[in-house]
Image (tube, grey):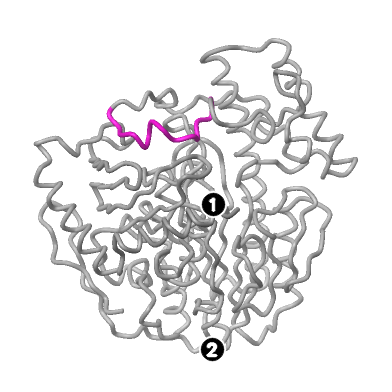
Amino acid sequence: MNRFFSNSIALLTVGAGIFGCAPQKQEAQKPNILFIMSDDHAYQAVSAYGHGLNETPQIDRLAKEGAIFTRATVTNSICAPSRAVLLTGKHSFLNGKVDNVQPFNWDQDNFPKLMQANGYQTAMIGKIHLDGIPQGFDFSMVLPGQGQYYNPDFLIDGERVRKEGYCTEIITETTLDWLKNKRDPNKPFCVLYHQKAPHRNWLPAPKYVNLYDDKTFDPPSNYFDDYEGRGTAAKEQEMQIDGHAMWGHDFKLIVDPNGDTTNFYNDIKRMNEEQRANWMAAYESENQELLNNMPEGKELALWKFNRYIKDYLRTIKSVDDGVGEVLDYLEEAGLAENTIVVYTSDQGFYLGEHGWFDKRFMYEESFRTPLLMRFPKEIKPGTVIADLVQNLDFAPTFLDYAGIDVPEEMQGESFRKLVAGETGEWRDAVYYTYYEYPSVHMVKRHYGVATDRYKLMHFYYDIDEWEMYDLETDPMEMQNIYDDPAYADVREMLHKRLGELREYYGDSDELNDKFLKAYLDHQANR
């Protein structure tokens, strides 16, 4: 695909850039790539971003020793589609994985296949959430579907094996074992080290079940959002912590307030005797205290928030530990200087903002994702990148570093020069789509455009509503300004830019209709 960006727009603070096509100089020794990705890790819960919620000292090392991206975003904020985008470098509507329902075609090109074909040794370890045996890897050990936190099953090169222990730790141990003992040291490597955590339902490791017991967290200022100033989509979602989260699955009660056994009993059954005893000792006294003295109203909503956020952050502690272990190995083995290390998440997540958990919306908390990166040969320590990069850009970026031609069908751009400080030219806007509705959480279908300051979204199918936000004056996106006459010129500009991006990337209302029909047909035939 030809690289396209429009002329700069006066209303934007970041002008559109023209990408050069000149090849990068390649080192005689190709760089290794360690691509670390967690699942649903909100940027608010990475301490390098400065929100003060928790500490992630190991992940933060990448920001200190390399770069942090403050406006990294995704093209489709849901697990499997996001992973398909990062592998293929193509939007969901081109790679075919628009939702968690449609199949993913592993036969199409992906960046690990191309690296494998060009001398790299490749491995995929952890969560990929795409059906079928992963293609492009010399070794794969992946969770089937979402996987389990305790004593998980894995597909090892396609063969199902159950491993005793805690999922996050097993994935880290396997990654280290492959790096230390299984790879060919004479070849450059590309490892996708992908954690399940902190995906719902946030079961912490045995050693962290009591972490934060001595702390009470304050929720975000808009936790008790009434959704005034927003449209139908925000009002009709089903992802409120106090309202839609479940007593068992989410809040870890084995018996609910009505005396009924919850679905969390299945999680308890999966644990071995030692794990179960450790869990019960940590949780059951507080659970019984709640049931015996059930609060109401805001007091109960705050209890739910704290149970949620503590478990969520506990799972992240294990992710951070694992990052530290792998970074330490790279240092000890003399590999750090020539290894590109990236940490990101498949998308962002709500940590009580608007009263929500989960993702899916184009609002900032789920649209943005953490991104930190280290490559001592090219990236200066303490680099901060505020430009609009996307998960669409990972594939071409990695191929660029490896000296491999980027296929024309890949739609992303390499941010190698950007993060090295060799160019200030970059895109002025990014495009977003979301398809999985009607479904769990009931977030309506929508697409949109975002610039450095403004955002325009169109919700469609069972409604036809537009929303627009000024992130400079309203960073929490509390007031839809689509019909505000003061923003008429901005609205016109955003509509124009949205149309340009849809045409450039190859999206259309006809494709929306196609994927809607396929989704509804699947739901009807289940």
Question: Looking at this view, is 66 or 43 the one in front?
Answer: 43
Give the quadrant of residue 141.
bottom right
Question: Looking at this view, is 160 or 401 the one in front?
Answer: 160
Give the quadrant of residue 256.
top right
Please provide percent x and percent y for residue 344. 50, 57
Question: How far apart in space, not on screen, are marks 2 and 1 (Cα)?
Answer: 44 Å
Specify the amino acid type for callout 2. Asn
Specify the amino acid type for callout 1. Ala
Q: How many badges with numbers are in the image?
A: 2
Question: Looking at this view, is 13 or 227 the one in front?
Answer: 227
Please provide percent x and percent y for residue 485. 9, 36
Residue drawn at point x = 48 percent, y = 36 percent:
52
Please provide percent x and percent y for residue 203. 70, 41
Q: Is the magenta stretch mostly helix, strand or loop?
A: loop
Image side of residue 114 versus residue 362, left or right: right
Q: Which residue lies furthest to the right in this view?
A: 273
Decide: is 479 above or below 493. above
Magenta segment boundaries in residue numbering: 229-242
Give the quadrant of residue 316.
top right
Residue drawn at point x = 51 percent, y = 54 percent:
345
Decide: is 304 above or below 189. above
Q: Earlier in the sequence, mark 2 or mark 1?
A: 2
Q: Residues within 10 Å of mark 2 (few under 14, many from 20)?
A: few
| Element assignment for label 2 | loop
Residue drawn at point x = 39 percent, y = 75 percent:
410
Give the labeled residue for mark 1: 524
Please provide percent x and percent y for residue 314. 65, 39
Give the labeled residue for mark 2: 118
